[in-house]
Image: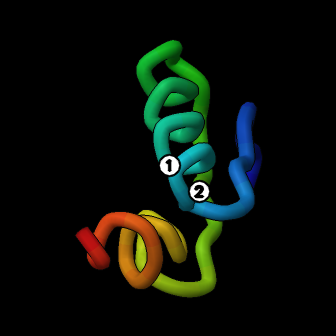
């Protein structure tokens, strides 16, 4: 498979980067071993509030 942009990690930086790449017309892949959003969204910063 060919991609213009591959983002490794779908945390608070990677997820928006992948979305922006797709919005700009790039064929984009986002690789994450766990849930999208990473540690901060799913287990760390945000759920504790």
- Residue holding disc 1: 15
Q: How crowded is mark 1: few (under 14 residues within 10 Å), some or many (20 or more)?
A: some
Q: Which residue lies furthest to the front in this view?
A: 49
* 1 or 2: mark nearer the eye: 1
Q: Residue furthest top?
A: 24
Q: How is the image coloured?
A: rainbow
Whole-percent x, y for residue 2 in the image = 75, 46
Q: Which residue is drawn at 52% across and 51% down?
A: 12
**Element on which disc 2 rests:** strand
Up the image or down, 38 lies above or below 1; here it is below
Q: Residue at x 33, y 65 (%)?
A: 46
Tell me whether the residue at label 1 lies in contact with that at label 2, contact meaning CB atoms closer than 8 angstroms: yes
Return the residue nearer the eye: 26 or 35.
35
Q: Residue at x 41, y 83 (%)?
A: 43
Q: Residue 47 carries which label?
A: none
Q: Which mark is residue 30?
A: 2
Whole-percent x, y for residue 31 in the image = 64, 66
Q: Quarter of the image containing the N terminus? A: bottom right
Up the image or down, 6 lies above or below 21; here it is below
**Element on which disc 1 rests:** helix
Q: Distance between the residues labelled 1 and 2?
A: 7 Å
Which of the 4 image quadrants contains residue 28? top right
Whole-percent x, y for residue 47 in the image = 28, 75
Whole-percent x, y for residue 13 in the image = 60, 44
């Amino acid at each position: 498979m060919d991609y213009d942009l591959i983002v490794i990690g779908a945390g608070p930086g990677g997820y928006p980067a992948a979305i922006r790449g797709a919005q700009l017309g790039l064929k984009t892949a986002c690789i994450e071993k766990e849930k999208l959003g990473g540690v901060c969204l799913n287990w760390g910063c945000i759920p504790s509030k």
